[in-house]
Image (cartoon, rainbow, N blue to C red):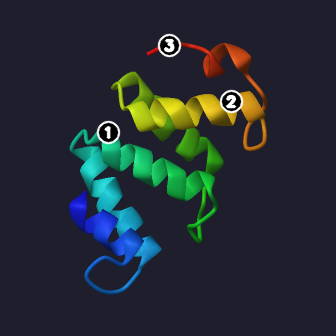
Amino acid sequence: MHYGRMLETGRGGRIDIEEAAIWYSRAVEQGDELAATNLALLHLNGLLNESNVQLGMRLLQYSAEMLDGVAHLQLGQICEKGKIVQQNLEIATTKP
C-alpha cells in the first residue's frame, strides 16, 4: 500500500498512477481498506486508463463498511451530490 501511495504522489521519484493502482489492488487483496479507498478514488476521479465507476463505488463502500473515515466521508459526499452516481441521501446521511 505504501509503495502505491509513493507512486501516486511521486514521493521519492516518479508519478505512475497505473502502477500505483496495481500496488493498491495487491493491498486490497490482503484486506487493506485504506488501499481500497485510494484505488476507489483513482477510479472515481477518472485517473486510470481503465477507470470504472462501479468498481470505485464498490471499493469505497467496502472501505466505509470497514470504518475507514475517509471512505465514509467520500461516499457520503458522492451520494449527496449525485454527480458521479445517482443522488442517494439515505446512503449520504448514514452513520458508520
Identify the image quadrant of residue 63: top left
Question: Which residue type carries mark 2?
Answer: Cys
First in residue order: circle 2 vs circle 1: 1
Q: Which residue is mark 1?
A: 33
Query: Relative to 5, is 44 above or below?
Result: above
Residue depth check, mark 3 versus mark 1: number of the one nearer the observer: 3
Question: Which residue type carries mark 3?
Answer: Lys
Query: Relative to 19, is 45 above or below?
Result: above
| Labelled pair 3, 2 in contact (Cβ < 8 Å) | no
Q: Which residue is mark 2?
A: 79
**Is residue 29 rendered to the left or right of residue 8?**
left
Quarter of the image that includes the C terminus: top left
**Is residue 3 rendered to the left or right of residue 33?**
left
Q: Residue at x 48, y 29 (%)?
A: 72
Question: Which residue type carries mark 1?
Answer: Glu
**Is residue 29 rendered to the left or right of residue 71?**
left
